[in-house]
Amino acid sequence: MAVELLKSHMVVLAEFAIDPETASLGELFRVVPDATIELERVVPTNTTLIPYIWVRGIDDRDVDQIEASLGRLSAIQRVELVDQVGGSYLFRIEWSSESDSILHAIADIDGTMVSGTGTRDTWTIELRCEHREDLTTFQECCERNDIRVELTALHDVTSAEVGDRYGLTAAQREAIVSSYERGYWQSPRETSLEELAAEFGISGQAFGSRLRRGLGRLIERTLVPRTEQSK
């Protein structure tokens, strides 16, 4: 599916399939072929990109092999195991600023990675960006670096549409999205209520109240069965 060049001020959500043989982290599946990799989040710095990845379907015996395998990649400066929950392991990776990776292609268009999951058979990522033209730029960047990607889904979404769908006001939606993108829900937190509130020009208490009301409505509309809502 080709990206159609249309001028748009809507938020664009796009899903791409990536050839696993051309994905930078595909090397892991030589060590743990039955594992699943989930990109947790990406933290940009002045000199590098730092993705956090969950590796699932492995055990303690595989961890050293994974770290050694990643450490051999020229694109990676450092890898560190930072958390473990059951059979899932969270790794922090420092990516070289000179590497030609999917993550750098996303950073180049100032896009946001909504999700990313990979197995030895397929990789899928979901991106959010401001314009469809950004997706064309992303594809071209991947092609120049021999990363094979295919657009599999594309949606234009406005803030109003999202709000209508889940019963959120524009202010509540902005508060929820900003808190997520700034790392407020991560552990440890990467920002505070006061810092988020300052961006909106309101008090921390007011921002917290806005966030709670929005999350309450979002949970009601997405997780609570309609039979319980009517009680």
Image (tube, rainbow, N blue to C red):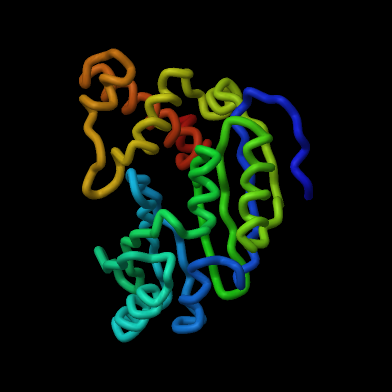
Q: Where is residue 172 drawn, in percent x and y?
A: 41, 22
Residue 178 versus residue 26: which sits nearer the camera?
26
Residue at 45% across, 83% down: 31
- Whole-percent x, y for residue 184 in the image: 29, 38
Task: Say whether residue 114 is visible.
Answer: yes
Q: Residue furthest front?
A: 98
Identify the residue shown where x is 35% and y is 47%.
43
Q: Is 47 displayed left or right of 220 in the figure?
A: left
Using the image as rendered, state which of residue 90 and residue 43 is in the foreground: 43
The answer to whether residue 182 is above or below residue 158 is: below
Instruction: Report which quarter residue 74 is drawn in.
Output: bottom left
Residue drawn at 40 percent across, 69 percent down: 55
Query: For the point 65% across and 56% down, which residue is it?
Result: 144
Q: How many marks?
A: 0
Can residue 225 be seen here? The reply is no
> Please, which residue is most extreme toward the top here?
201
> Which of 197 and 163 lies nearest the eye of the viewer?
197
- Residue 144 left/right relative to 74: right
Specify whether 155 is left or right of 212: right
Which quarter of the figure has residue 196?
Answer: top left
Percent position of residue 168, x then y: 48, 23
